[in-house]
Image: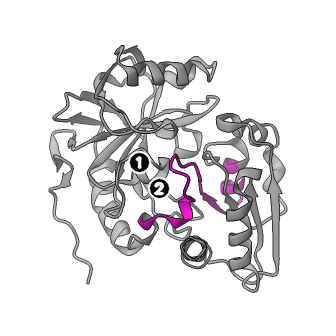
């Protein structure tokens, strides 16, 4: 267990962050993830001259509030690893750090099976391959005005993204031009008032785990207006109500998973949304992704085996990329 955690920590420090001796590294964590923080620190010592930790109050999904209220908290550092349960990449402090050209890695450690995320096999994905796959998909997203998605479960969703540029995450800070996420995916912020149609969630519900049965959601004018009354739907409704923010119902991101090591089992938020053969809709805040939507949080709904069209060109069929995939030797 400890060996696998150290393997994951070394991937983060040596391959993703690629820290330099002159970096001033900050590891942000909570008391629930002190073990991971210590392992990251162990792998960083000797590679950088300065390693500091910031243990923040465990506020669950609302941990980002602190980083909205303290935008300048990352100013003294050149590199930041946000190793809390929930993603901080969409917070004001992260946005400021990115604008100031600091290295920023979002490393949400939330899992539902008692294992550390650093132990998961999906961290072994070849980042070069994911980068090449992402660039092919991004070419088609960049030049399209809308995305149409259907799935065997019944999703039929139209998403608009005119004048929104796609990006990708694969953990590697250099590939992300200064910031990245442990989620290996292509993403694009979407127009906040235009998403319409049916989304049938049959993968996972972000942080709260597996969708136990396919559940129908209706989008109109960019937001969820109806959630089917299944057991999964009831869990989702309660979770969203607990944000106490109507903006959490707004679709802010469209993403495509690129990690062939990942499985969408509901055990790990980052693994689920990274899984090759899935797409996700990110709800709520999308400021750091190039959007205009603020909210008290951000989480993703993951769906399986999509057919994806950019404008009228099909780029994915039942979860498989059908445009020519680059070959990596």
Left or right of residue 245, residue 322 in this image: left
Q: Which mark is residue 84?
A: none
48 lies above or below 233: below
Query: Is 201 in front, or is 284?
Result: 201
- State the residue in front, 248 or 313: 248
Q: Are marks 2 and 1 in contact (CB under 8 Å)?
A: yes
Viewer can see residue 30: no
Q: Verify whether residue 261 appears in magenta.
A: no
Which residue matches tag 2? Answer: 183
* Residue 271, image x, y percentages: 43, 54
Q: Alpha-carbon neighbours of circle 2 within 10 Å: few (<14), some, or many (≥20)?
A: many
In the rendered image, residue 58, in percent from the top left (x then y), is placed at 75, 42
Give how far apart the Cα atoms at labels 2 and 1 are: 7 Å
Where is residue 176 drawn, in percent x and y?
A: 51, 63
Q: Earlier in the sequence, mark 2 or mark 1?
A: 2
Residue at 36 percent of width and 66 percent of height: 130
Residue 185, placed above or below residue 289: below
> What residue range appears in magenta?
94-121
Residue 132 placement: quadrant: bottom left
Quadrant containing the N terminus is bottom right
Answer left or right for 237 relative to 24: left
Rendered residue at 73%/37% (across/down): 59
In magenta segment, residue 106: yes
Q: Residues within 10 Å of mark 1 (few under 14, many from 20)?
A: many
Residue 273 bears which disc, if any? 1
């Amino acid at each position: 267990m400890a060996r696998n955690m150290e393997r994951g920590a070394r991937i983060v420090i040596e391959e993703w962050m690629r820290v330099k001796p002159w970096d001033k590294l900050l590891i942000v964590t909570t008391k629930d993830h002190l073990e991971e923080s210590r392992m990251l620190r162990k792998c960083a010592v000797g590679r950088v001259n300065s390693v500091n930790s910031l243990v923040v109050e465990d506020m669950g999904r609302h941990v980002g509030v602190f980083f909205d209220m303290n935008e300048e908290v990352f100013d003294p550092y050149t590199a930041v690893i946000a190793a809390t349960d929930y993603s901080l990449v969409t917070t004001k402090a992260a946005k400021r750090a990115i604008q100031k050209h600091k290295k920023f890695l979002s490393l949400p450690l939330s899992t539902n099976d008692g294992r550390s995320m650093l132990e998961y096999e999906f961290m072994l994905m070849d980042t070069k391959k994911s980068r090449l796959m992402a660039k092919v998909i991004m070419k088609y997203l960049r030049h399209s005005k809308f995305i149409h998605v259907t799935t065997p479960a019944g999703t039929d969703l139209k998403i608009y993204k005119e004048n929104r540029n796609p990006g990708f995450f694969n953990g590697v800070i250099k590939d992300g031009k200064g910031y990245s996420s442990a989620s290996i995916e292509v993403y694009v912020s979407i127009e906040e008032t235009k998403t319409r149609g049916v989304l049938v969630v049959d993968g996972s519900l972000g942080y709260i785990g597996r969708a136990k049965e396919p559940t129908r959601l209706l989008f109109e004018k960019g937001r969820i207006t109806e959630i089917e009354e299944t057991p999964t739907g009831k869990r989702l409704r309660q979770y969203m109500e607990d944000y106490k923010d109507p903006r959490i119902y707004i679709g802010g991101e469209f993403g495509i998973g690129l990690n062939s090591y990942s499985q969408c089992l509901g055990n790990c938020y980052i693994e689920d949304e990274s899984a090759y053969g899935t797409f996700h809709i990110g709800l709520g805040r999308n400021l750091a992704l190039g959007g205009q939507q603020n909210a008290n949080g951000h989480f993703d709904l993951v769906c399986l085996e999509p057919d994806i069209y950019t404008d009228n060109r099909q780029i994915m069929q039942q979860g498989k990329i059908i445009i020519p995939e680059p070959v990596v030797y």
